[in-house]
Amino acid sequence: MVAPEAWHCHTISPALQSTQKTSKQLLRSMGLHSSRPQLYPGDILEFPRNKHFSHFGIYYGERDGVPYVAHLTARDSDSKLLLFGRALKSEVKLDPVDLVGTCYKVNNYLDSTHTPRDFYHLVKPEIDDAMGKTFTYDILFHNCEHQATLYRYGLKKSVQIEKIYGQIYPTWKELFEKKKL
């Protein structure tokens, strides 16, 4: 489980207060609290969505004093309906951190085994180049966590998917062996 001090919940406009309250309640239900992490361009930011999944992006830096995150997301509302884990239209977007989520944490979880890539010489140009291009979203092979780790470390990894796969694989294996699937 994540250390409680890793999460940060920030204040947003009154129009989004109900979303903020929901996110804080979610964190409490997960046994987590908030803090203010120091952000550096290239950090992976994790935004909790529910007890099992989070949204991931790369901290891009500030523009006019507003912190921004680059993240893989559905291109429009029509493509948010996933069919077999895929949305036809996805893109890397640059949005204010407040818009992406009211709670987040820095989660550079592969730093102990992989060297982060240079943000200004490698990652930032890749993010800038990806803007406006269409990608195929695939929950198993190319989701927002895969994109974030690809930018930071140069490799795709999704611990969320590995964890779920680890839970369902034994059941699937048993069903295949019994020829019930």
Image: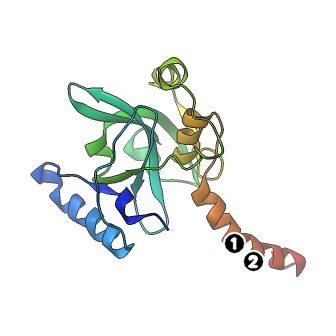
Instruction: Identify residue type, mark 1.
Output: Ile
User: Is residue 95 left or right of 74 when viewed as pictured?
Assistant: left
In the depicted view, which residue is nearer to us: 154 or 137? 154
Instruction: Decide: few, some or many residues near mark 1? Use Cα within 10 Å; few <14, some 14-19, many ≥20.
Output: few
User: Where residue 179 sits in the image (x, y, percent)?
Assistant: 88, 78
Residue ID for mark 2: 171
Colouring of the image: rainbow
Is residue 74 at least partly visible in the picture?
A: no
Crowding near the residue tagged with mark 2, few <14, some 14–19, many ≥20 C-alpha atoms within 10 Å: few
Does residue 10 sit above or below 151 in this rendering? Answer: below
Q: Are marks 1 and 2 in contact (CB under 8 Å)?
A: yes
**Residue 22: x percent and y percent?**
26, 66
Which of the 4 image quadrants contains residue 132? top left
Where 68 sits versus 159, above or below? above
Res. 7 image quadrant: bottom left
Q: Amino acid at mark 2?
A: Thr
Q: For the point 57% across and 59% down, which residue is it?
A: 160
Q: Which residue ends up furthest to the front in the rendered image?
A: 112
Q: Residue at x 45, y 57 (%)?
A: 54
Q: Quadrant of the C terminus?
A: bottom right
Dot 1: element: helix
**Residue at horizontal 39%, vertical 40%?**
76
Residue 130 vs residue 23, the one in the foreground = 23
Residue labelled with disc 1: 168
Identify the residue shown where x is 68% and y is 65%. 165
* Tag count: 2
> Spatial distance from mark 1 to mark 2, Cα to Cα?
5 Å
Residue 97 is drawn in which quadrant?
top left
70 or 82: nearer the viewer: 70
Q: Inspect this view and state whether residue 37 appears.
A: yes
Q: Percent from the top left, x then y, of residue 92? A: 46, 33
